[in-house]
Every structure is written in C-alpha cells, then in structure tokens.
Image (tube, grey):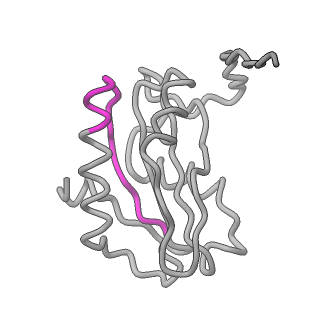
Amino acid sequence: MKSIIKEISISYESGIKNRVRISSSEKAYEAFLSSWDMGLIELQEEFKVLLLNRSNIVLGICSLSKGGVSGTVVDAKLLYSVALKCSACSIIVAHNHPSGNLKASEADISLTKKLKQAASYLDIQFLDHLIIAKDGFSSLSDKGLF
C-alpha cells in the first residue's frame, strides 16, 4: 500500500489597497471593531489577532477562536503559525467581553504574558492586548499590565 503525503504550500500576497497604519491603541480598536460582527459582540466571546508589518501597516486580521458567553480558547500555536505565515513583524491581539466589562481578568493578564513571551522567541513584537466592547475598549499595554 502506497502512502500519499501532501506537500505544504506557502504563499504570500498582502492584497493591501487601503494601507492602514496603527499608531495607537485607539487606531487598533478601530481596526478590530471594523472586523467584528456587531450583532454578536454582546453575545459571544471571540479572539482575534491584528497582523502588522515593520511599519505597523495592517497586513490583516485573523479570527482565531469563538467561544461562549464567558470565554474562548486561545491556541498560541495557531496564533503564531498565522503570524509567521504572514511574515508579521508585530501583532496586537483582542477579545471581546460580551458583558461590556472592560476590566482585564487574571486569566487575560496571564495569557497576555504567555503570548508576549512566545513572541520574543520568534522575533515578533507583541504590542498590545485589547479588551473590546460595543462602546469602548481597554488596552493592557496602556495600563501597564504586562
């Protein structure tokens, strides 16, 4: 019996037409919010990554997981496989709190520190972790929480 092993194919095409530069947590919030389903932001927690080039130009936004009302699972391997495939130099992550509470939980802070540590091994800058709600956001970086 013959085994068939598929070859992994990697390609890169940014397709960037309107180049958006992220210069602050507010700009990152606006970018994330434009990709969020506003009909679900108060219902279901979702975790996304904003991928940036060396000039902090947005390469894209990738939704990594969707969960329930009070949580979602984040797989660091998946996050960094996407970042590496896109040749991202920097990333910003975000997740929403369906409750609207913008306070970072201990789990949020712990995850952020873990993801920042992993980024350092890959020479990727981990810039921020935003907590998003329909009417606002909180930046863990601005608050000095990691």
Q: Is residue 13 above or below residue 130?
A: above
The furthest residue to the bottom = 99
Q: Position of 16 compared to 52: left or right?
A: right
Q: Position of residue 136 (x, y in %)?
A: 47, 70
Q: Position of residue 48 (x, y in %)?
A: 54, 52
Based on the picture, tell me whether residue 126 belongs to the magenta stretch: yes
What residue lies at 68% left-to-right and 74% top-to-bottom? 40
Q: Position of residue 109 (x, y in %)?
A: 26, 62
Magenta-drawn segment: 118-132
Q: What is the x, y in percent for residue 107?
A: 30, 68
How many numbered callouts?
Answer: 0
Q: Quadrant of residue 12?
A: top right
Q: Residue at x 40, y 38 (%)?
A: 23
**Farthest front residue?**
1
Residue beneath the point at 57% across and 48% down: 31
Asked whether, in this view, residue 31 is left or right of residue 95, the answer is right
Query: Could you say which is closer to the camera, residue 83 or residue 90?
Result: 83
4 displayed left or right of 51: right
> Which residue is depicted at the point 61% across and 75% down?
44
Quarter of the image with the N terminus is top right
Looking at this view, is 77 or 145 the one in front?
77
Q: Is residue 129 left or right of residue 17?
A: left
